[in-house]
Amino acid sequence: MFTADNMRFLLELSRTGRIVDAAKRLDVDQTTVSRRITRLEKDMGARLFDRGSSGWQLTEAGRRLVPYAEAVESTLLAALDATSSAGSGSLHGTVRILTPDGFGAYVLVPGLGMVRDRHPGLFTELRTSTTHDLVTGRDFDLAVTLERPSPRSVSVSKLANYDLRLYASRRYLDSHSAIEALDDLEDHTLVWYVNAILDVEPLRRLERLLPKDRAHVQTNNITGHYQAVRYGVGIAPLPTYIGNADPDLVPVLPDKFVAERTYWLVVPRELARLARVQAVIEVLLDIVSENPDLRAPGQGGDSR
């Protein structure tokens, strides 16, 4: 007999692609997940997943069913959201946030006190990354991305523009040769991302502005770049919201090297109506508006 509850199993398995991960998220054993999917396939009269060495992939029939499963999930979440908030008049629950590492560590985390002040019953979980597949797993309630994802099942809006510039410490500049043009960088230590994992297109475009094969130090996150610059290891591109906040750092070639980038706000459509998600989005917009090195939509230049 068809039950809406089995749709939860379809969604979690489609998002994780692995029985073991879906079971953990559903707090059941793997056998239960497999049995529920088999039951749903029998009820639908079609195979919903292809099983392979790379995981469980939705078939065409499964993909057609996902929007209906998301609608069921959205309705249930909205009901739970309304019920949990009705008694006390305050918001409760957890909001899961995904962001690039720089934005998460240097912008969002310092501003999360606003969430606690306004909604003490809310919990936030923050995960950071700098990969193009940041939002493909759908394991989030809202996300900030460097690339604009397909709007097929998410709501996408521009959150902010920001600038990337080259920075060095005063100590480094005092002990090395002068830098007056991009070609002068060939005589200096450059810090950049590990090429093998550099899969975000805006960062790849920025890399093309630098002298070829001159990244002497490579690390996989912006905190590593910042620490390398701060301790005088070399010169690195940093968002101005990081570089300008440290009085010991100095912009290098400020008139010759600047790259404008965009942050996008992404929310799964089935979660967009949840009061707790909207509350965190409101805080996020306030954090952006109060940061002098972030430009909200309509302010300054527009990179897209």
Image (cartoon, rainbow, N blue to C red):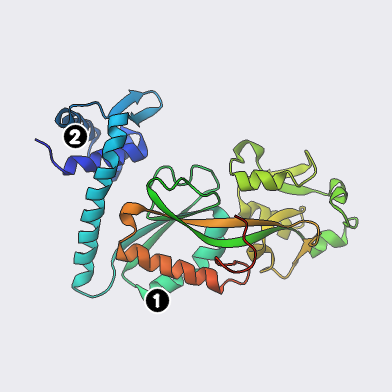
Observer-side mark, 2 or 1, equals 2
**Residue 31 shown left or right of residue 188 in the figure:** left
Neighbourhood count class around disc 2 (C-alpha, 10 Å): few under 14, some 14–19, many 20 upward: some
Task: Check disc 1 and report its element: helix, strand or loop.
Answer: helix
Residue 12 vs residue 217, the one in the foreground: 12
Quadrant in which the N terminus appears: top left
Query: Going by the picture, which residue comes out furthest to the top?
Result: 52
Residue corresponding to mark 1? 117
Neighbourhood count class around disc 1 (C-alpha, 10 Å): few under 14, some 14–19, many 20 upward: few
The three-letter amino acid code for the residue at tag 2 is: Arg
Residue at 23% x, 31% y: name it.
34
| Precedes in sequence: disc 2 or disc 1 | 2
User: With respect to residue 112, does 237 lie above or below?
Assistant: above
Quadrant in which the C terminus appears: bottom right
Residue corresponding to mark 2? 36
**Residue 82 shown left or right of residue 303 in the figure:** left
Residue 198 appearing in the image: yes
Residue 112 appearing in the image: no
**Residue 304 shown left or right of residue 128 in the figure:** right
Residue 268 locus on image (x, y percent): 37, 52
Residue at 27% x, 73% y: name it.
90
Residue 290 vs residue 264, the one in the foreground: 264
User: With respect to residue 252, does 185 lie above or below?
Assistant: above
